[in-house]
Image (cartoon, rainbow, N blue to C red):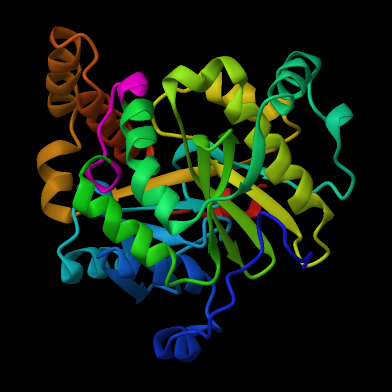
Amino acid sequence: MLPNTLLESKARAPSPWMSAHLHFPGAALARFLELRGRRIVKDCGATWYAGPGRFLMSLPYQAILNPDPAELRRMIRETGAFGARFPSATWAGVESGLYVMRAREYDIESVHVKQRRRVRHGLESLYVRPATKAQLLSQGWSLNLSTMARQGRFDPEFGDRRRWETLVEAAFACSEISFPAAFHGGRMAAYMITCREQRWLHILHQMSRQDELSHSPNHVLTYEVTRQAALDPDLDAICYGYVPLCSANGLHEYKLRFGYELIPHRTVIQLHPVLDTLLNSRVARAAVHAARWLSHGHPRLDTIESVLKGAHTSGPPTPARITQP
């Protein structure tokens, strides 16, 4: 690993929890989430965490699963989750994928010409370096609020001041978590949360300040983090997240223009058996669609409608599907 880079792990001894569980895939992400108060479950041959809406989400994000349907239903019932979501190549589900970079050579010429201009412009006034805990606690929260206001959403972990402090404390207790940030003078213009998970770097979150966007801090940060990670011989890949359930065409084009490739898989959504009986029907989906139309596309209703559509299309593999790529 390159010394003194944006992505350098913090020099701390692993906790007893980490020492005992370091061997399993997803351990670093699981510990970070657990310290933030998320429930962690190991079952069905995978690691899961309780995400928004009491859904179990699988870890690590690049692990393609093929769980036994009966065992999956048992896990959902026993944990009291509303459902589970995971990537698969054999189950039916929503067409999705991960944004991945595996390049060993990456420079400004690797970036699409339209983004290249913004990166160069941003580098004239911005400096990228790891953010300190103090900087995140004093400035990070305002970036969160600015970003979520632009996107028309609210995540309590980033919007509630106390929960944001808990997240920051959790991150600085995990040596694999870093906060590369773009600064305009002493002012933080954008930051990322990244996690080194075995030989992968995961870009988990990215926030920016509205009144700094003219300096292109997101473009500069994406470029610099990707460039340094590509140079790291201890990394095999960089993951820039997965395709969201709700459409985000602008974000899709943004990631592709920075050289990331969409690696396809199917996102499987399985509801708790009781919820599946109540909600996985044409009538329920029509009711949610009508409510969404009447509310002019409320983000929460958008998500609920996408989840119900995903649950309707998801299902365990058949012999024909297993034999066909």
Front-most of 60 and 17?
Answer: 17
The picture places residue 169, in percent across and down from the top left corner, at: 35, 64
Could you tell me residue 178's position as x and y percent?
55, 58
Q: Which residues are magenta?
A: 149-158
Determine whether, in the image, residue 238 is placed left or right of residue 288: right
Quadrant where the N terminus is found in the figure: bottom right
- What's the residue at 53%, 51% (across, down)? 131
Q: Quadrant of residue 93?
A: top left
The percent position of residue 108, horizontal first and vertical second, equals 84, 30
Q: Is residue 117 visible to us here? A: yes
Residue positioned most to the front: 186
Image coordinates for residue 254, horizontal then vertical, percent? 62, 24
Q: Is residue 69 visible?
A: no
Residue at image x 31%, y 71%? 40
Q: Nearer the viewer, residue 43 or 247?
A: 247
Q: Is residue 12 shown in magenta?
A: no
